């Protein structure tokens, strides 16, 4: 039997800092998530809106240059007011803002679906197979474990929110060939990236908290769908009830020439009352995605962009344009408060669910 030296041996390998211990958990989680074929297909489909965003920004850049390359596409742009097409450079920021608004709105719902595929197993599977003591028996703190699991969600969702936003922005710059475009639109890029991170971190914390509540990932998925879909449905029902009550309060009676009484809805009065009461409208707060959408609207300045585009329209068309695209908004601080509250509640749940396992280290 060979005899080994039991004395000190110098470690000649590469040392790594403690600050990046969570990255090992993230790398493993991303590898497992990407093994899901359905997730890969969904990622591919989620990049189709990104391609549309990039195409829209490139076309607008060519419009600013008065390029003949898009002469055949001009008939497809007849829905845009001629005053805007006559000077596309003047309305660059507004058009870019609206394009990013629609793109991020679509990707928000794509992110909700991706969380169903990635999030439920992150902690519930470790609870089911008693894997948490194996994690915590290594030089891994509880915060490292949480950050590693959160990093999985952030990485996957960034592929459909942050990365496409940057990719489309770069293509828009290349096709514009105008130095001033960076100063005009760089704030929009920062806002898009910031919103993407808000979606990643907020939804990541919520799904991790839900995942820690059960060993069965199917129950976790149902809880997430309930938070997303049921909350949105309840918010829509409350909004419809409020709309009907407002319309009923502003209708008036008129006598028809044939002698019978008809009810006529005073739409201007209803909209004026709706705008007046917008600051106290709490119904969208019930929907998780509505809160995220309100933050997006505030970061991008979507309402200001719609108002600027409406200013070039004739008076008779302006009211209808505003009615169709510009809805009265409640204070964005309310949505921020709801999201912060969910973040804090999720952090407390995670802390309490895993705290007792520290004794096993």
Image (spheres, rainbow, N blue to C red):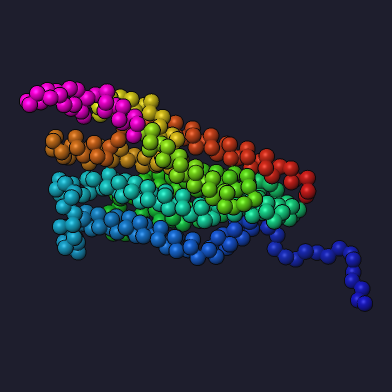
Which of the two residues, 353 or 172, is positioned nearer the viewer here? 353
Which of the two residues, 73 or 277, is positioned nearer the viewer here? 277
Which of the two residues, 281 or 78, is positioned nearer the viewer here? 281
Answer with left or right where residue 307 lies relative to residue 350.
Answer: left
Please tell me how many numbered marks the rendered image carries: 0
Q: Is residue 244 magenta?
A: yes
Q: Residue at x 47, y 44 (%)?
A: 228
246, above or below 206, in the image: above
Answer with left or right where residue 213 lies relative to residue 321.
Answer: right
Residue 352 in the image: state x and y as whole percent.
Answer: 68, 39
The quarter of the picture where residue 26 lies is bottom right
Q: Is residue 101 magenta?
A: no
Residue furthest left as drawn: 257
Residue 159 in the image: state x and y as whole percent.
Answer: 46, 57
Residue furthest bottom as drawn: 1
Q: Residue at x 64, y 42 (%)?
A: 350
Residue 93 in the image: state x and y as whole percent.
Answer: 29, 45
Where, quadrant-wise, is the N terminus in this rendering? Answer: bottom right
Q: Residue at x 54, y 37 (%)?
A: 342
Answer with left or right where residue 72 lies relative to residue 195.
Answer: left
Answer with left or right where residue 220 lies relative to residue 86.
Answer: right
Q: Residue at x 21, y 49 (%)?
A: 88
Question: What residue span does the magenta drawing correspond to?
Answer: 240-269
**Is residue 45 visible from the viewing direction of this image?**
yes
Residue 4 in the image: state x and y as whole percent.
Answer: 89, 71
**Is residue 197 visible from the viewing direction of this image?**
no
């Amino acid at each position: 039997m060979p005899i080994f030296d039991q004395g000190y041996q110098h470690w000649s390998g590469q040392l790594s800092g403690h600050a990046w211990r969570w990255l090992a958990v993230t790398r493993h989680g991303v590898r497992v998530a990407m093994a899901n074929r359905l997730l890969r297909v969904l990622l591919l489909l989620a990049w189709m809106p990104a391609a549309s965003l990039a195409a829209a920004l490139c076309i607008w850049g060519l419009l600013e240059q008065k390029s003949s390359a898009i002469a055949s596409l001009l008939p497809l742009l007849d829905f845009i007011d001629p005053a805007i097409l006559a000077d596309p450079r003047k309305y660059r920021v507004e058009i870019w803002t609206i394009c990013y608004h629609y793109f991020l709105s679509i990707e928000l719902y794509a992110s909700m679906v991706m969380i169903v595929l990635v999030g439920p197993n992150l902690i519930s599977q470790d609870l089911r197979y008693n894997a948490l003591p194996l994690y915590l028996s290594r030089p891994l703190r509880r915060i490292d474990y949480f950050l590693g699991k959160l990093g999985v969600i952030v990485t996957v969702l960034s592929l459909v929110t942050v990365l496409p936003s940057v990719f489309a922005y770069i293509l828009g710059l290349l096709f514009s060939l105008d130095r001033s475009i960076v100063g005009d639109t760089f704030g929009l890029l920062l806002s898009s990236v910031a919103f993407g991170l808000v979606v990643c971190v907020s939804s990541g914390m919520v799904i991790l908290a839900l995942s820690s509540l059960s060993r069965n990932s199917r129950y976790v998925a149902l809880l997430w769908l309930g938070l997303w879909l049921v909350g949105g449905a309840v918010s829509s029902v409350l909004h419809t009830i409020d709309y009907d009550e407002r319309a009923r309060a502003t209708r008036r009676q008129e006598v028809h020439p044939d002698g019978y009484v008809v009810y006529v809805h005073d739409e201007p009065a209803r909209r004026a009352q709706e705008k007046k009461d917008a600051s106290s409208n709490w119904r969208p707060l019930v929907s998780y995605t509505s809160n995220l959408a309100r933050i997006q609207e505030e970061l991008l300045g979507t309402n200001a962009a719609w108002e600027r585009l409406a200013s070039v329209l004739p008076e008779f068309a302006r009211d209808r344009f505003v009615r169709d695209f510009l809805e009265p908004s409640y204070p964005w601080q309310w949505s921020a408060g709801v999201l912060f509250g969910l973040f804090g509640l999720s952090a407390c749940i995670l802390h309490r669910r895993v705290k007792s396992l520290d004794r096993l280290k």
